[in-house]
Amino acid sequence: MDRIYRNLQKISGSFFVSLPKSWVENYKLHSKSPISIQIRSDGALLISPKLEQTDDHDLKNELKLDATPYVVRAIIKESLSGQMNVVVTSDRKIEKSLKNEIRRFVSGLPNTEITEERPQRIVIQNFGYKKIPTKKLIQRLLNLIEDMFVDVKENARDDLEYNFDQLRKFYFILVTHIRTYLKTNIYVTEDNDFTPLEAMDYRMFCEKIEEVGKILRVLHISENVLDFFEKIFQYFKEVMEAYMTESQELAHYAWLKKDKLEKDALELMTGLDWEDKDRIKDMIYMAHLIKDMAAVI
């Protein structure tokens, strides 16, 4: 990224700075062009063409798609772009296999439902996800993992599966937020107060959360490993608290704690059968992931 320096100029009590000519020409701006200026918490100013910030201006009230074998990809793309109504049509009866595929993928999209279904027409309505602040999404992911730990402990497999599905949905939303910002420098939500470095940290942090969720989804614990499972659960809650309170001190303490947990695990594995050893190995891997989460707080 190029860094350009300019001197402030003062005219009639107001301060001005010239913009790079190449930037102005690249976005086809002129002397009357509106621009967007955002003030970040670190004092930086983000200047972008106003026309890019209103990326919904091209969206239609209703977008029609042909019922091709590849229409599902288009549905996902358009829904995540903010398209509110997508209509899939066909000049003949839509095949059952395609209809089931559309149902399955739409059910996995956040705040998106099929509101009309006819032999030759399917209407998908997107009720919107852009209003969800990115930091609220991360908090939701953490809460879901906390619930999944409880589900594993109580062997509540239905609840565990439901929470994992919710985890994937919210992770999908968050990745969309971060990718949109990193590719276009446009904030998808209203919480437009993070830098590109923080965006990357958010992405890394939440990748680790999702990996923990994948392990919990298939984890079964026995009485022999229950105490160590509780230690891992407590470890996660400590990192969660560090994130929620933005405490560098708690994050550093948690980062150091992983080695002690790994030592305890290796001692515990002596005398266990192979199934319990595999469970301990899975939990050690979770400890690694949780440590990585602490590292980017």
Image (cartoon, rainbow, N blue to C red):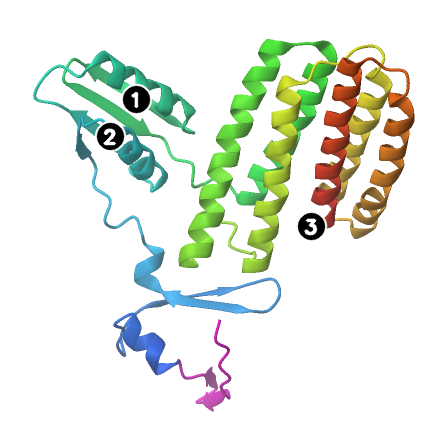
Type of amino acid under label 3: Val
Q: Which residues are magenta?
A: 1-19
Q: Residue 106: x and y, percent? A: 35, 24
Left/right of residue 76 with respect to residue 181 in the rendered view? left
Helix, strand or loop at label 1? It is helix
Left or right: where 225 falls relative to 150: right
Q: At numbered mark 3, what does the secondary structure look like: helix, strand or loop?
A: loop
Front-most of 235 and 18?
235
| Residue at the image point whose x is 30% and y is 33% from the top | 73
Rendering coords of residue 135 (x, y %): 58, 43
Q: Quadrant of residue 209?
A: top right
Q: Mark 2: which amino acid?
A: Val
Of the numbered discs 2 and 1, the one sitting upstream in the chain is 2
Tell me the residue that label 2 is attached to. Answer: 71
Considering only vertical position in the picture, is 50 above or below 12? above
Q: Earlier in the sequence, mark 3 or mark 1?
A: 1
Q: Residue at x 31, y 68 (%)?
A: 34
Residue shown at 50%/40% (left/top)? 174
The answer to if 86 sits in the magenta stretch is: no
Is 159 above or below relative to 108? above
Q: Is residue 12 magenta?
A: yes
Residue 282 lies in what quarter of the image?
Answer: top right
Which mark, residue 262? none
Callout 2 secondary element? helix
- The furthest residue to the left: 91
Q: Which residue is mark 1?
A: 102
**CB under 8 Å between callouts 2 and 1?**
yes
Residue under pointer 3: 296
Labelled pair 3, 1 in contact (Cβ < 8 Å): no
**Marks 3 and 2, how far apart in space?**
38 Å
